[in-house]
Amino acid sequence: MQDITLILLAAGSSTRFGMAAKKQWLYQADRPLWLDVANNFKKKFHFDNIIIVSSAKEIAYMKNFADFEYVVGGSSRQESLSNALKAVNTSYVLVNDIARCCIDEDMINRVISGKEKASCIVPALKAVDTVYLDDIPIDREQIKLIQTPQLSKTKILKSALSQGKEFTDESSAIKSMGESVLFVEGSSIAHKLTTQDDLKKLPCLTKPSTRTLVGYGIDIHPFEADKEMKLCGVKIDSPFGFKAHSDGDVAIHAIIDALMGAAGMGDIGELFPDTDDEYAGADSTKLLQDVVSRILSFGLEINNVDITILAQTPKLLEYKAKMRAKIASLLKIDKNRVNIKATTAEKLGFVGRKEGVTVHATASLGYFNWMEIV
């Protein structure tokens, strides 16, 4: 037993990355980057536990992929790490940023093998270029470019991070307490993914799968008198709307379920429960925009949707073009990839009796091909 817990930090917002997809969700074949990194660590090294730190909304989705231990991160790297340390019971902790996604086994073994030699073991690279501080050249031999993963004694790291100061990494926090830090040879392979340009510097990355993901959604709502009717985000001229906790846009609700089904995200009730007052009378277009934003940030892209509206009344032919345009805009795809069909129930059932409307929807997704940008 190594008595080491691995913490993988993936709670960043990727603001400097400049893509709708967060960098931790760039697909490697059919695995998101965070999972690829976690699996590689698990395969190549033995740890007593592996903890993945991310945002609450991402963790709910991550749990569908693998059974690691997950911890909700904070507003900064240090806060995220402090949250994770509460779950660590081993004497040592190895901390790596998911953004350092290429694993150099020799470098990591150098770090781990030094665990009893100092309070923190740090991989570092030497500066090879001339270095200036403001307008003054400094001796580059004194410069160290710090990397992760870093191995620390758990108790000391917890104390170091509780000082009320902000640190950029574990070594600087531990050094501030007068504790020992040992530098070992780093690796150019362990380059950090921060901007799109960094994608060219990471040889371990592989292209995403071309797999198509398909989902199906259905929703049903009865009519309610003296309420505005909306279908696909378009106002319909009708003396009644839909009885529902939100605005009752039955078409958008079916689309949301289809999209969530294709992504493996569960269903609309899990994200927007009808027991939550926050969604009372909610604009369904806003709910759809939220789902689209999540899907894109999770490294997926929307291929197309196909919608069938079963309504004896009202007549919808004159609204279909507006509906198509509205849904295309909300999904951020071309209009030709949105298809809307409307039909009656031939006077059968509750739809035929003009008591409500049913909508069926299918949606297909693909993995965002980030390699086209590189």
Image: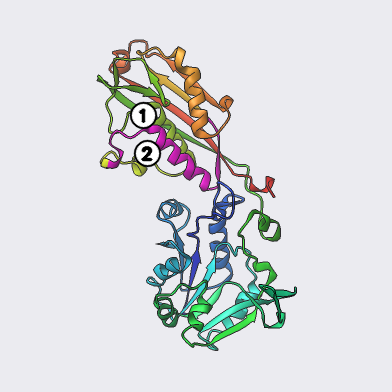
Q: Could you say where residue 269 lies in the image, as x and y percent from the top left?
A: 34, 40
Label 1, residues with CA under 10 Å away: few <14, some 14-19, many ≥20:
many
- Asked whether 131 or 203 is in front, the reply is 131
Residue at image coords 67%, 60%: 204
According to the picture, the residue beneath numbered tag 1 turns out to be: 219
Q: Return the disc, 1 or 2, that comes first in the chain's sequence.
A: 1
Amino acid type at mark 2: Ile
Tell me: residue 100, above or below residue 3: above
- Picture quadrant of residue 53: bottom left
The magenta-colored residue range is 278-305
Compared across the picture, whether 292 is left or right of 245 comes to: right
- Picture quadrant of residue 249: top left
Residue 127 in magenta stretch: no
According to the picture, the residue beneath numbered tag 2 turns out to be: 268
Residue at image coords 39%, 75%: 164
Q: Could you say where residue 323 lies in the image, as x and y percent from the top left?
A: 47, 22
Measure the C-alpha gap from mark 1 to mark 2: 10 Å
Check if mark 1's residue and mark 2's residue have beta carbons within 8 Å.
Answer: yes
- Asked whether 177 or 67 is in front, the reply is 177
- Picture quadrant of residue 154: bottom left
Tell me: residue 264, above or below residue 282: below
Q: Could you say where residue 331 lies in the image, as x and y percent from the top left?
A: 51, 34
Residue 282 in magenta stretch: yes
Compared across the picture, whether 315 is left or right of 27 comes to: left
Tell me: residue 119, above or below residue 251: below
